[in-house]
């Protein structure tokens, strides 16, 4: 006995009309699958499952659970240590009066029209001190809080005090006059990993680097994890935190510095560079490298030749290779000058 042909069920009127037009030849494309609730005889794969909409990332991630694009800076770094945070208004206010440096301050969002003069005053002081202030939902602060008494504000204290770029330049001038050491400064453009900054601090201390410059935003800061990764070097290497890396580069050029940028696309090798004069070395982000705007400010872009299978170097390792080559050149110069005397 021949089986009776099963006709598709149409609970959606538009789907029924589309199927009829296809059978009459009025359209060349087959009807789309019915997106309505499945019937008893409907196939499992005839219903398209919803997919999460992809959102272009701007330094954060898309959360399907909350259906929001979450900014990365809205949450503390996973490796952040609870010992470098202050919670509550009075502790933060007293820390500001004592001159403590804050990396970042999280405050609870307020509804429109709601006024809080006390919190507003603290936020202004945080801004004036150079801290990055981020507004988040109160639930975020509740998850971050260990005391459960944050009062709408949590601050991350810097593991060490920052200095100004002028202070680093003065330190370099003094060392040159007293010891004959030519200044060498490292600038970090968008470095995000704490262990990389910690390792670069160790490299800077080992080779006698004048100082390090980092941006205030979109960059790792001097937190407890960085201090631990530096193995104590954070106590000896001055770090300046600037609003704009390009402005810092312009200031260094005015002081006679040559600007070198680590770039994998360059054809210039480290041995072809002259690191013996005043030098500023720029190390970029772990994934994207130096930004295009900062790259255009460099005098020379330099590449580290590689001969292995994995054509990539850790940011701190690349920094160490270039700094070691620079110090080799300076030692060779000092040796040659000593032989001529």
Image: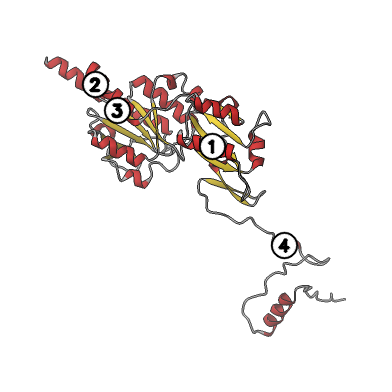
Q: CA distance from mark 2 to mark 3?
A: 11 Å
Q: Using the numbered discs, state the Cα–Cα distance from disc 3 to disc 4 in whole angstroms.
A: 67 Å
- Quadrant of the image containing the N terminus: bottom right
Q: Indicate which disc residue 45 carries.
A: 4
Q: Which residue is mark 3?
A: 169
- Specify the label residue 176 is tagged with: 2
Front position among marks 3 and 4:
3
Mark 3 or mark 4: which comes first in sequence? 4
Q: Position of residue 207 (x, y in %)?
A: 34, 21
The disc, 1 or 3, on the residue closer to the chain's N-terminal end is 1
Horizontal relation, residue 328 to residue 190: left or right: left
- Sequence-wise, the earlier of marks 2 and 3 is 3
Which circle's residue, 2 or 4, is located before the other in the chain?
A: 4
The picture quadrant where one finds residue 81 is top right
Q: Position of residue 247 (x, y in %)?
A: 33, 40
Cα gap from disc 1 to disc 3, whole angstroms: 34 Å
- Mark 2 Cα shell of 10 Å, populated few (<14), some (14-19), many (≥20): few
Q: Along the horizontal axis of the image, is 11 left or right of 73? A: right
């Amino acid at each position: 006995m021949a089986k009776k042909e099963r006709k598709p069920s149409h609970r959606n009127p538009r789907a029924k009309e589309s199927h009829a037009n296809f059978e009459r030849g009025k359209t060349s494309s087959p009807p789309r699958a019915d997106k309505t609730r499945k019937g008893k005889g409907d196939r499992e794969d005839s219903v398209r499952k919803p997919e999460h909409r992809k959102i272009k990332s701007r330094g954060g991630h898309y959360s399907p659970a909350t259906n929001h694009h979450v900014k990365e800076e809205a949450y503390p770094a996973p490796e952040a240590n609870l010992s470098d945070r202050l919670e509550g208004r009075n502790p933060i206010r007293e820390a500001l009066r004592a001159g403590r440096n804050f990396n970042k301050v999280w405050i609870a969002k307020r509804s429109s029209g709601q006024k809080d003069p006390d919190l507003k005053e603290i936020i202004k002081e945080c801004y004036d001190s150079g801290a990055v202030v981020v507004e988040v939902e109160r639930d975020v602060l509740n998850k971050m809080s260990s005391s459960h008494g944050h009062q709408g504000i949590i601050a991350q204290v810097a593991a060490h005090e920052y200095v100004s770029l002028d202070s680093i330049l003065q330190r370099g001038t003094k060392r040159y006059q007293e010891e004959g050491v030519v200044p060498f400064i490292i600038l970090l453009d968008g470095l995000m990993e704490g262990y990389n900054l910690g390792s670069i601090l160790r490299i800077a201390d080992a080779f006698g680097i004048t100082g390090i410059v980092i941006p205030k935003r979109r960059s790792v800061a001097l937190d407890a994890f960085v201090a631990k990764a530096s193995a104590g070097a954070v106590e000896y290497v001055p770090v300046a935190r600037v609003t704009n890396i390009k402005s810092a580069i312009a200031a260094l050029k005015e002081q006679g510095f040559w600007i070198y940028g680590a770039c994998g696309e360059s054809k210039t090798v480290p041995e072809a560079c002259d690191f013996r004069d005043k030098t500023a070395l720029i190390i970029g982000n772990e994934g994207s490298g130096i930004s295009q705007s900062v790259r255009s400010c460099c005098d020379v872009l330099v590449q580290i030749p590689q001969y292995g299978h994995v054509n990539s170097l850790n940011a701190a390792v690349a920094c160490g290779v270039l700094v070691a080559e620079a110090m080799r050149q300076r030692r060779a110069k000092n040796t040659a000058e000593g032989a001529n005397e």
